[in-house]
Image (tube, grey):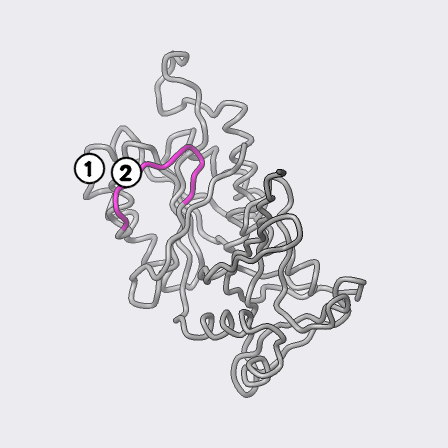
Amino acid sequence: MAKERYIPAAGAVVLRPGADGPEVCVVHRPRYDDWSLPKGKERPGESGPEAAVREVREETGLDVRLDVRLDSQRYAVPGGDKQVFWWRAGVLAEHPWTPDREIDQVAWWSVPRARHELTHADDVHRVEQALALPPTTAVVLVRHAKAMDRSNWTLVDAVRPLTRRGRQQAQDLVPLLGAFGVRRLLSSSSTRCVATLTPYARAHGLDLGRSSRLSEEEGSEDPDGVRSVVEELLEIALATGQPAAVCGHRPVIPHMQHALGLPSRHMATAEMVVLHVGPDGEALAVERHRPTS
């Protein structure tokens, strides 16, 4: 008997301010003659956040920034099980959109209308969940991408570079960080950390801050210094509402996790932990992602 397929998909509850309160972006699918939320299947090698942002763009013409993660949804489809990962999202930009066979209408509905006219009860649940959660700001902790082995490097460790795989991981982080709209970057001053965030900084025209306090040489034995740097980044992110990312080393990561209120936990190379921080500075949700390269 053939093994049933697992089909990952992703979507978003896209909200915007309206004259009479929040409005929800909905789409009409002629094949099913239903009104639903934008979503679609992940492509091979694509992460959930990347898929959610891409599907929203394709189905609505909207560029969005993902916010807090919502409940996922799993159900049977012909040939397997489909799991949809959901996020709340806000609009960054709007582009011309042309109806097609998959989506022939896009609309902004008031919350009362969405409650009564969305075809599927699960979509109504996700809208209610998105509205019930307070505003959040994403703060992303990144472990640097794969670096050259110490045993093969003869110069000072601070300038040890990324391997070819590490450089690919750094490139693969660009759409992942972009899905959460990261606008502020901070790195250890060491080359392998700087190189991990440089592709994203270049792609979005952002400055990349550097701190020697986050380096392995200084940060490993100075948890107070690490905490001070990370807490300052968190304060700025909350004050400005701009999502931020900070990159560090394996021995320093536990101090960075502590500063962000996270339990100490191993992170793989190029792995990122996304904290969705509420107005009071407490993390309301945490998710982990890693490039497939």
Rendered location of residue 54, percent (x, y): 64, 54
- Residue marked by disc 1: 222
| Left or right of residue 180, residue 248 in this image | left
Above or below, 179 against 196 in this view is: below
Query: Identity of the amino acid at label 2?
Result: Arg
Circle count: 2
Nearest to the observer: residue 123 or residue 82:
82
Rendered location of residue 18, percent (x, y): 56, 82
| Left or right of residue 22, residue 141 in this image | left
The residue positioned 52% from the left and 84% from the top of the image is 21
Evaluate if marks 2 and 1 touch, with contact meaning CB atoms under 8 Å apart. Answer: yes
Nearest to the observer: residue 38 or residue 255:
38
| Left or right of residue 72, residue 223 in this image | left
- Residue marked by disc 2: 213
132 magenta-colored: no
Q: What stretch is highlighted in magenta?
A: 262-272
